[in-house]
Image (spheres, grey):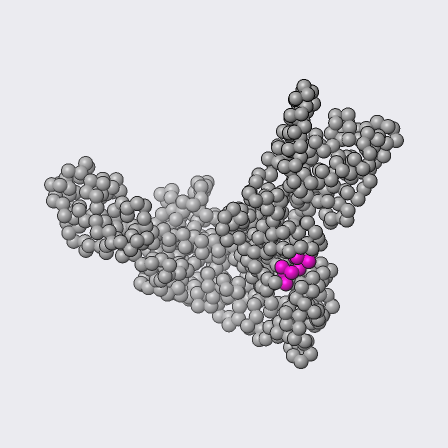
Amino acid sequence: MADPSSYRPRPGDVPDSPGVYRFRDEHRRVIYVGKAKSLRQRLANYFQDLANLHPRTRTMVTTAASVEWTVVSTEVEALQLEYSWIKEYDPRFNVKYRDDKSYPYLAVTMSEQFPRVQVMRGHKKKGVRYFGPYAHAWAIRDTVDLLLRVFPVRTCSAGVFKNAARTGRPCLLGYIDKCSAPCVGRITPEDHRELAEEFCDFMAGRTGTYLRRLEKQMMEAAEEMEYERAARLRDDIGALKKAMEKNAVVLADATDADLIAVAEDELEAAVQIFHVRGGRVRGQRGWVTDKVEDVTTGALVEHALQQLYGEESGDAVPKEVLVPALPEPVEPVQEWLTGRRGANVSLRIPQRGDKKALMETVQRNAQQSLALHKTRRASDLTTRSRALEEIAEALGLDSAPLRIECYDISHLQGDDVVASMVVFEDGLQRKGEYRRFQIKGFAGQDDVRSMHEVISRRFRRYLAEKERTGEWADGTGTGPVGGGTGIDGADTDGTLAGPEVITDSLKDDDGRPRKFAYPPQLVVVDGGQPQVAAAQRALDELGIDDIAVCGLAKRLEEVWVPGEDDPVVLPRTSEGLYLLQRVRDEAHRFAITYQRTKRAKRFRAGPLDDVPGLGETRKQALIKHFGSVKKLRSATIEQIQEVPGIGRKTAETIAVALAQAAPAAPAVNTATGEIIEDEEPGTTGGSSGEPVTAGVPDERRGQET
């Protein structure tokens, strides 16, 4: 590991001008390429105290052994040179979009004497017009098959073409009028090229001209009583319209645009692109990348634009590019795109209307792509095994942690403090073993104290199970399935997973699943040093010394272990870090879902909830009969008895409970500020469907944790 100060250039040697810089390792391999408006200011950021650098940047500068730079005259030149060097050197610390396939294009080889329509993949060639990309090659073939009725352009390979010319017999498409058969001289090279140009015009979106022309020819043929020709033209029009219907109109103004959306987390990002030509979606593509460097959404968009248009020119770069965030600064990128197109290019964020709605669709595709990528990655056995081995090695464990439990605390400004416990076995979720807790030992906001309470309660129950059964669990069995009341009255939730087969060894004497009977090899807490210390202290107080503890701090993805002043920094490409992140994020999701449920239930609570034996059906009957709790409070016992299902004893209980309950704060219509005097919490809500609050704190002032 190199010391950055050993190769740091003197500030006076670095020019204060635009340029591109390269970091090289000890073997002279380029490991990072970047551009800057001011080389002096940008490089100075890399040579500050390592503790202040992002872990990914810290890894890069300690891997590097030298830095060099090239001065350019403008930021646009810097952008172009950066792209060229990234393509040339493939540096390991730069964002690299990877794809598991090459997307097919519909290509027309206009450079040949007799242009050919075909499916092409890979690098684009000069003299070839491309349309797409398409998601599947069969979609191209379906479109071409429909269009060949009207534009019978050559589709055969060079070998088939030469063989037909030698024998004087066209292929099958020539006999069924789906090829003009230039191989046997049925059409001149000039006429065939004009046919190919018309095919390209139609694919480029200029469809109205050809439809109107064919409709006119069909009417003329019908007037001249050439009904067979009119029928053929009718079928041609139908084929063209069917080909057009394969791409639905999404933008009514015949827009040519590319829409780019990004879905990301701390470790990875997915990019989706929709190509819209003539107002129709002509193609779609996407990439997934590891976020090797610490980049913003705008920077990810800039890298995507480089990948997308770095080797394009002319009409391949559309007039309009819609993005979720603009690169910073945006002017050089927009100028670079304009140079690639040869005309002005608008780079902007859609704000309203059809374009914003379509961008939301692209965004959903990006999110689904990222989720699918994560699912595939998590389901790979080899990858999961490597992740567990990397965690064991980083934390110094004797064996891979086959069972991992993760804990998280959630609250809203100290109210409704809850905790979650999620379980991963062999790197996969065990939702049937998730548990959730209410913090009961104290009131208020204290994540460290809450973590200590939860860990203590969970493992106190584990020790109680061992003492009751006289067994020493080795952690290799399958955990509990199903819900129930947790330790010390804690709420637990085991209803998320479907029913599973439970062996006798996993059951109590009464046949019910054993709860909290199986220890993990690793406890992960969501947090840094304080939370880790609290969890370890709880285990020490219980005399448990065979369970490892670590914490994952979300801000920098640092792994903390008890008793250490410095975190364990796993490599950015580590599968172990990826697994720990998934475990932590799942615990956070489960905790915050439970916290929101409790908060919503508390906000909906009313005086009738405290009446013993009064169920939801009879509460609704009371509210429906009287109209509000306020009117019910003023009713006599005899009047309450008039409600179906309410006897005298129940009516007396209701009257006593309402008399003892303090009147709630007035309900407020949050849209108008109007105080609704006739309603209280637990009623049917405000009028006209307006949102109503009743002494409820504004959620927007709080922050869920």
- Quarter holding the N terminus is bottom right
Q: Work out whether residue 561 or residue 696 is closer to the camera in this orientation and state it.
A: 696
- Against 255, is 577 above or below? below
> Which region of the structure is painted magenta?
332-339
Apparent side of residue 617 relative to residue 291 in the rendered image (left or right): left
Asked if residue 48 can be seen in this view, the reply is yes
Apparent side of residue 179 relative to residue 256 in the rendered image (left or right): right
**Which residue is found at the position 64% from the left and 41% from the top?**
205
Residue 333: say if magenta. yes
Apparent side of residue 120 relative to residue 514 in the rendered image (left or right): right
**Which residue is found at the position 69% from the left and 23% from the top?**
229
- Position in image of residue 488 (x %, y %): 33, 55
- Position in image of residue 631 (x %, y %): 17, 46
Q: Work out whether residue 22 or residue 130 is closer to the camera in this orientation and state it.
A: 130
- Position in image of residue 293 (x %, y %): 60, 63
- Dominant SS of magenta comes to helix
Residue 287: say if magenta. no
- Position in image of residue 534 (x %, y %): 42, 66
Q: Residue furthest right?
A: 166
Asked if residue 86 can be seen in this view, the reply is no
Q: Quadrant of residue 392?
A: bottom right
